Structures are given as structure tokens and as C-alpha cells.
């Protein structure tokens, strides 16, 4: 097990490396942030948004929770989303799930209690909405991973329907929503679907109508 003091030593080395490479690096950080991306992902320790996308400090606004759920009554996420869309004006928002998600494994297995059980209410709703699609998979691993995918799709649609995103699109602000899944087995991110202001949301709520990411998506 790593001793906590190793984190502080590693931090010193990291700051030195950045400063050696670019003596102005931290001075520029003080000036403010202008990230292009908002990342909404799972809290899982194996999923490291900045590391796996090689994003330097200042490049990504981040919100994480168990099973990357989007609830419009979640003040934490809605505050992050409000700041990201209204002030930072990020151009892209990713909802990124990951295969083998413990939160969704627990949703399938049941038997949770306390805060986790309450939190997973939203994930159970996803399972109920796509029960056949998930439970018809041949084994536990593929059932969880199918739930991971339909969960990303449903959370992205919920994100698109929030007042904040609808207001951004109404004022012609360009915000593109991306549904991704990170594969902890090989480190690769799989794009599942994209939504923008012109996407008919009702059409992608159906299990057999997943929109696949187009290769010429805006950067
Ligand atoms: Zn997870």
C-alpha cells in the first residue's frame, strides 16, 4: 500500500518537472481557467480523466460521482454545469461511464443500503427502463457492461434535457454532448453517441437507436 507521504513527495516532483519544462507554467495558472471540456464521470479510482486523455491542468472542468449519474435535482452537478456552460462556456461535455462499474454492478445485484442505495435510485430507473436489453445478456460481465452503455445514453439524454443545456442551445451557444465508455480492460475510450442542439432526443431514447459518433464531429 502506498504511504500518504508518497503523495506529497510525488507532488513536489511533479511541480518541479512542470516548472523545469516551463518556468511560467504556474504563473499562467493564476491568470484563470478556460477549459474546453466538462467531464462528467464515475468516481472509480481506475478511471482518471486527465491522465487517460493526456489533458494538462486547466484543460478540463470535472464532476465525478458514483456511476456518472445526471440528476437535475443534484445541486452539486447543476452548480458545476451552470458554471461550465454560463461562465466557462465549454464547447464539449462528456458523460463517460466505464465497463465493470461497481455502482452499476451493485444496481444489478441489489442489497445496497444507506446513502449508496438512495443514490442508485436513478441507476435502478435506467435498469428498469432497459431491463430486457440488459438481462438478456449471457453473463454477469456483459449484463453490467450493457447497463454501463445504456446508462451513459440515458444520462446524456437527461443532460440534454436540463434547463441549463436547453437554455444554452436556445441562445445559440454551441455545446456538444458526448456519451463515452472507458474500457478498463485496455485503456481505450469508446464513443457511443453524440447530441447537439439539432438532435431529436425522443429518437435516441429507444434501445435500438443508438447514434454512433460521426468521424467528422466538431472539434
Ligand atoms: Zn463506476
Image: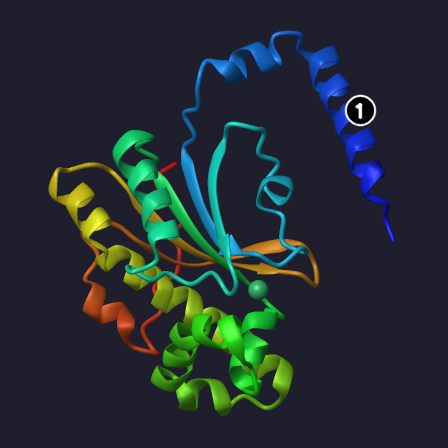
Q: Quadrant of residue 37?
A: top left
* Left or right, 95 with reference to 188: left
The residue at the far front in this view is 114
Between 106 and 189, the one lying in front of the other is 106
Q: How many marks can you see?
A: 1
Q: Position of residue 174 (x, y in %)?
A: 24, 38
Q: Quadrant of residue 145?
A: bottom right
Point 80% across, 24% down: residue: 13
Quarter of the C terminus within the rendering: top left
Q: Position of residue 85 (x, y in %)?
A: 29, 38
Q: Position of residue 71 (x, y in %)?
A: 33, 62
Is residue 142 visible to the viewer in this orientation of the structure?
A: yes
Against 131, is 36 above or below? above
The residue at the far left in this view is 170
Is residue 197 visible to the viewer in this orientation of the structure?
A: no
Q: Position of residue 86 (x, y in %)?
A: 25, 35
Point 41% across, 88% down: residue: 131
Amino acid at each position: 500500500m502506498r504511504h500518504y507521504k508518497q503523495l506529497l513527495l510525488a507532488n513536489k516532483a511533479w511541480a518541479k518537472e512542470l516548472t523545469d519544462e516551463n518556468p511560467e507554467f504556474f504563473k499562467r495558472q493564476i491568470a484563470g481557467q478556460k477549459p474546453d471540456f466538462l467531464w462528467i464521470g464515475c468516481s472509480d479510482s481506475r478511471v482518471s480523466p486527465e491522465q487517460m486523455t493526456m489533458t494538462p491542468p486547466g484543460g478540463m472542468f470535472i464532476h465525478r460521482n458514483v456511476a456518472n449519474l445526471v440528476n437535475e435535482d443534484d445541486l452539486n452537478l447543476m452548480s458545476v454545469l451552470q458554471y461550465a456552460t454560463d461562465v466557462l462556456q465549454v464547447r464539449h461535455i462528456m458523460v463517460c461511464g466505464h465497463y465493470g462499474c461497481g455502482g452499476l454492478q451493485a444496481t444489478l445485484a441489489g442489497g445496497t443500503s444507506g446513502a449508496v442505495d438512495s443514490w442508485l435510485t436513478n441507476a435502478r430507473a435506467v435498469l428498469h427502463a432497459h431491463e430486457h436489453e440488459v438481462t438478456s445478456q449471457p453473463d454477469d460481465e456483459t449484463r453490467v457492461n450493457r447497463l454501463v452503455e445504456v446508462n451513459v445514453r440515458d444520462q446524456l439524454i437527461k443532460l440534454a434535457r436540463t434547463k441549463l443545456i436547453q437554455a444554452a442551445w436556445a441562445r445559440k451557444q454551441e455545446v456538444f454532448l458526448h456519451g463515452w465508455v472507458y474500457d478498463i480492460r485496455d485503456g481505450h475510450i469508446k464513443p457511443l453517441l453524440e447530441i447537439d442542439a439539432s438532435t431529436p432526443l425522443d429518437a435516441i431514447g429507444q434501445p435500438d437507436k443508438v447514434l454512433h459518433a460521426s468521424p467528422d464531429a466538431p472539434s
